[in-house]
Each structure stands twice: as structure tokens, then as C-alpha cells.
Amino acid sequence: MNIGAVRSIPAMFVLNFITLGIYHYYWVYYVTLEVEKFTKRKDISPALELLLSIMTCNLYTIYWYNKYGNIIYKEIALKIDENDKDNKSQIIMTVSIIVLLAGVPIIGILCYVLFFGLLVSGMSLVYSDFNFIELIDNPEALLIFFGTILVGFIILFVIIFSLLIPDIIMQKQLNSIWEKIRTKK
């Protein structure tokens, strides 16, 4: 019986942050692959799930959480004789929708601030005839420049955090399932 990997939740957070959210796509692919191998279902295609997640900028992932949440919490749980009465796939989908609905406006506002911060920083650089020494003497220009960099990091953090919440919920269940299977062997 093929079983999946037990992944560390803190490591998932660190890897998502270091790779700027690209680890999420790796995670989607390999969780789909693990579910396919464990259930031996022919209707599961990890490459297609990954492609749809990337092409739709993670909108498909909301459906993915529901589909694979049901498989993990119902089908796999039944295969290991675990009566899981708490179907968390609906919770995962609800959390991902809430995070998406809350995160998109925040990201939009931050992108707006980032755009104008870059615009003002660029204008001040052009105004100073690309004299960086003159810019260092101008505290307002430096404040806008460093504020723009900070907003860029906040945007990355919000995106990574919005991808990570549902992943962690689902990975905790998978870790529990894979550990139970290992202990039964």
C-alpha cells in the first residue's frame, strides 16, 4: 500500500515563504499524487490539477480543496477503518473562500500602494537626475522607497498566508492518516 509523506507544518510555512508561494503548487501536485497512488483511482491526474491551479491563479484550488478534502476525509479514512465523523473538507473550502475574499481586496489595496510608491520613487529618482547621493539626503524619498519595499513584502506575506491556511488544515489530516497506517504495519 502506497502511503504519503508526513510533512512538517512549520517547514511548510518556511518553504512557502522562501519560495514565495511556489511550494504551494509543489504541495498540491504531490498531495494529489499521493491520493492517486493510495486510492488507485484512475480519474485523478496530478499534472492536470497542478496546471488548472496555476492557470486559474488558485481559483481552481478552492474546488481542489473540496474534491480532495472529501477523498481524504471520507474515502481514505474508510480505507483505514477510521470513522471520521468530522468532515473537514467543507471547513477547508469555507476557510479558503473566506481567506480569498478577505485577501484579494487587501492584496488589491497593497498593489495600488505599491504601484504609487514605485511611481513616486521613480519620479524622485528621475527628478534627482539619478543622483543617489541627493536621494539619500531627501528623507521623504527614502521613506517612500523603503515603505514601497515594505508593502511589497506585505503583499508576498498575505499571498503566502492565504495559500497556507487550507494547506495546513488538510496536511494535518494527511499526517494523521499516514502515521496511523505506518503504526499498523
Image: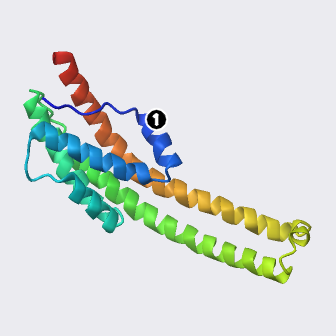
Q: How many marks?
A: 1
9 up-or-down from 91: above or below: above
Residue 36 placement (x, y as % from top left): 15, 44
- Residue at horizontal 79 percent and vertical 65 percent from the top: 143
9 up-or-down from 108: above or below: above
For mark 1, does the 10 Å Cα neighbourhood hold few (<14), some (14 to 19), or many (20 or more) residues? few
The residue singled out by tag 1 in the image is 10
Q: Nearer the viewer, residue 40 or 74?
A: 40
80 up-or-down from 157: above or below: above
Q: Nearer the viewer, residue 129 or 21?
A: 129
**Residue 147 sits in which quadrant?**
bottom right
Q: Residue furthest front?
A: 47
The quarter of the picture where the C terminus appears is top left
Q: Amino acid at mark 1?
A: Pro
- Residue at horizontal 29 percent and vertical 41 percent from the top: 170
Relative to 63, 169 lies left or right = right
Residue 183 visible somewhere in the drawing: yes
Residue 122 placement (x, y as % from top left): 73, 77
Relative to 58, 184 lies left or right = left
The quarter of the picture where the N terminus appears is top left
**Residue 136 sits in which quadrant?**
bottom right
- Residue at horizontal 68 percent and vertical 66 percent from the top: 148
Q: Nearer the viewer, residue 87 or 70?
A: 70
- Residue at horizontal 20 percent and vertical 31 percent from the top: 3
Residue 94 placement (x, y as % from top left): 29, 54
Residue 166 visible somewhere in the drawing: no
The chosen color scheme is rainbow
1 up-or-down from 98: above or below: above
Secondary element under disc 1, as helix, strand or loop, is: helix
Residue 115 placement (x, y as % from top left): 61, 75
